[in-house]
Amino acid sequence: MVPKNILVSDDEPPICELLKITIEKEGHRVFTAFNGKEALKIVQSNSVDVAILDIKMPQLGGVEVLKKIKAINPDIEVIIITGFADLETLRQTMDEYGAFDYLLKPFKGEDIIPILKSALLRREIFSRKRDLKGTEDEIVQLEKNFIERTRKLRESQIKYKEIIESSNDIILIVQDGKVTYANRKTREITGYSENEILGLPFIELVVPEDHNLVSYKSSSTYSFRMRKKGGGDFLAEVNEVNTVWEDRPAVLKFIRDISERIQAEQHIRVLSQQLIKAQEVERQKLSCELHDRLAQDLSTLKLGLDNLFSEFRDSGVYNEIKKRISELSRMLKGAIMTVRDLAYDLRPPSLGYLGIVQTFKGYCEEFEEKTSINIEFYSAGIEKLKLNPDIEINLYRLLQEAFNNIKKHAQATLVKVRLTASFPNIILIIEDNGKGFDVEKCLQRAGLEKKMGLRSMEERVALLRGKIRIESQLHQ
């Protein structure tokens, strides 16, 4: 192979040195320049076969140098290297100004070799066009096809790079436990430079206390606390995909900073808890008013109606008036029962002095009497527990909501309620033999129609930092 003269021009000396060493290993002579003017002087005073130009250089940019080189000698092939490429620049440099190809930063030294070989081959073919007159048209067509394929390939690379580099998420490629690629967001969030993070063991980006979460993860999606270079950390959510990078197995990691989201969720949870507590306080006040004042006043009124004629022995009192007052007394009795039911629904008084088990038992018996649905209630390990009032009232609301749904929709004849304590958990299981429903569709519909049944149950369980599982099958 005859050695060729290659010009490398970049304002970053490490890149010039990397390319120089790599190309010289291929047996070529290399000239280096650190700005556009130096590059032009080299072209003017030396026979250059291929020029490799950074697109952004001091004194004279790469595109301007490209145009001037083509004006000096159009046979010199030019390869553009850049980390700032866009599709319009690509189109201009290749279609209008005659650049041969692009090399996108970051790259490895050996990445330049196949592009350089193609550029030298193209130069050799066109230098021999006079000896290949019969096939000149074919060569020109092959060249056009090659340039078009190259341009499309570089366009796809630029689009890919723009997507990756403009992402708001950290994107890493990890091979053999070490970071081999990191996008711009990684450097912005963690504070590591590109040189610092490339080759860094991924586990060093993880807070030591969370190493087990990463080493023994059971899913491709998981969370951990990610370290920053200058100290501090943030909560990260990771999605992993197995891939191939430079012909070797790799893991592509999409990492999102969820610290603000978690804080917002916690803030919403606190506000929701405060709202529910405020509602319970108001319910308790209203319950007391209904029970202690309105119900008592209505009872006194009924008693007065019932005894209205007990003091009169006069047979002249009209029987029709007695009959009418008796009817009013029955109506008043019904109103008293309704008020008391409302008061008990708002805040069961038995929670305060009988406890959760007796309150559940009483509510089950009352529901069975009103609906004729058989209720089987069982409790274990919870009778002697001193529960927080917030836990008690929320458990009671869960039972209320579940029974309300069963009465409205299930067409059930039997409901089993199990309330048990298994340290440190309290387990409430409500099961019925009704017709069943599609859980996913029902939850979606509840969200769209702003119905609060199942969603309210989920919210209450979340406020207790518990878990809820709803199982059902349609018509089963």
Image (spheres, rainbow, N blue to C red):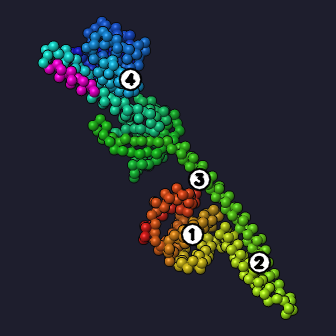
Tag shown at residue 404? 1
- Which of disc 2 and disc 3 is earlier in sequence? 3
Q: Main secondary structure of the magenta part?
A: helix
Front position in the image: 216 or 474:
474
Q: What's under tag 4, amino acid-wise?
A: Thr
- Which of disc 3 and disc 4 is earlier in sequence? 4
Is 138 colored magenta in this rendering?
A: yes
Q: Residue 285 sits in which quadrant?
A: bottom right
- Which of disc 1 and disc 2 is earlier in sequence? 2
Image spot of residue 327 (x, y percent): 74, 83
The residue segment tinted magenta is 135-148
Q: Is residue 316 left or right of residue 182?
A: right
Quadrant location of the N terminus? top left
Image spot of residue 442 (x, y percent): 48, 61
- Which of disc 2 and disc 4 is earlier in sequence? 4
Q: What's under tag 1, amino acid-wise?
A: Asn
The structure residue drawn at horizontal position 17% and vertical position 19%, both measured from the top left corner, is: 136
